[in-house]
Amino acid sequence: MVENGDKAPATKLGKVTALILMFGGLLFISGLTASIASSLTVNQLTNNPNGFNEFKDRAVGTIDKSGTDIFLSEHFFKNLKTYSNVNLGLEDLEKGETKAFLYDEPILKYAIQKDSTFNKIVLLPVKFDVQFYAFGLPKTHIELEQRISQRILEIIETEEWDIALNEYGLAEF
């Protein structure tokens, strides 16, 4: 007895062709889904509303004559207000006189954690003009440089170093 319905390939070649077409379709749909998801993710990242350029036309603060001050001035920040110290800048941010305070992340984290009046301030994960800290030594002090480098390595490998970083909210540094 033959029932009406979908037809299945009867020959071996037909079955192999059907199998190839099924897997090909599966791969095509997977690729299409992945490309759409990737496109949406990239679009979301490039249109990040909390991005660096959003603040170019807003009132922002930083420390006077700092590397950040120079960088922001060179990158066309129009409404830049400078402060003599971090606490003054954070106070103006808290009052709403500026929309953002841009400066070194570890210093901002420490200031916010140390003073409870700044507990409403949130650090955004926006990085720009990344810089590293260094010790300046005369070239003639090679032995001192080696001793300092060795001691720094010894310190950062200890549990006390991790505890100190966590205590000041700097664990990711």
Image: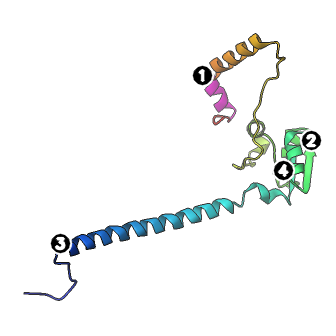
Query: Between disc 3 and disc 4, whose residue precedes?
Result: 3
Could you give the CA–CA distance between mark 1 and mark 3, rounded to whole angstroms? 66 Å
Residue positioned most to the top:
143
Residue placed under numbered mark 3 in the picture: 12
Tell me the chief SS of the magenta region.
helix
Q: Tell me the SS state at disc 4.
A: helix
The numbered mark at residue 91 is none
Which residue is at the front of the view, 156 or 59? 156
Q: Earlier in the sequence, mark 4 or mark 2?
A: 2
Of the residues tagged 3 and 2, which is closer to the observer? 3
Please name which of the two marks, 3 or 4, marks the residue nearer to the observer: 3
- Between the C-alphas of marks 4 and 1, the distance is 37 Å
Q: Nearer the viewer, mark 4 or mark 1?
A: 1
Residue 79: x, y in percent? 91, 56
Residue 99 point in image, percent of width and height:
83, 55
Tag 4 residue: 93
Asked which secondary structure carries label 1, the reply is loop
Pointer 1: what residue? 157
Q: Earlier in the sequence, mark 2 or mark 1?
A: 2
Question: What's the residue at 74%, 36% (across, down)?
Answer: 106
Q: Position of residue 144 (x, y in %)?
A: 76, 12
**Vertical position of residue 151 compared to residue 67: above or below:** above
How far apart marks 2 and 1 lie (CA) works out to: 35 Å
Which residue is denoted by mark 2 in the rendering? 64
Residue interval drawn in magenta: 160-169
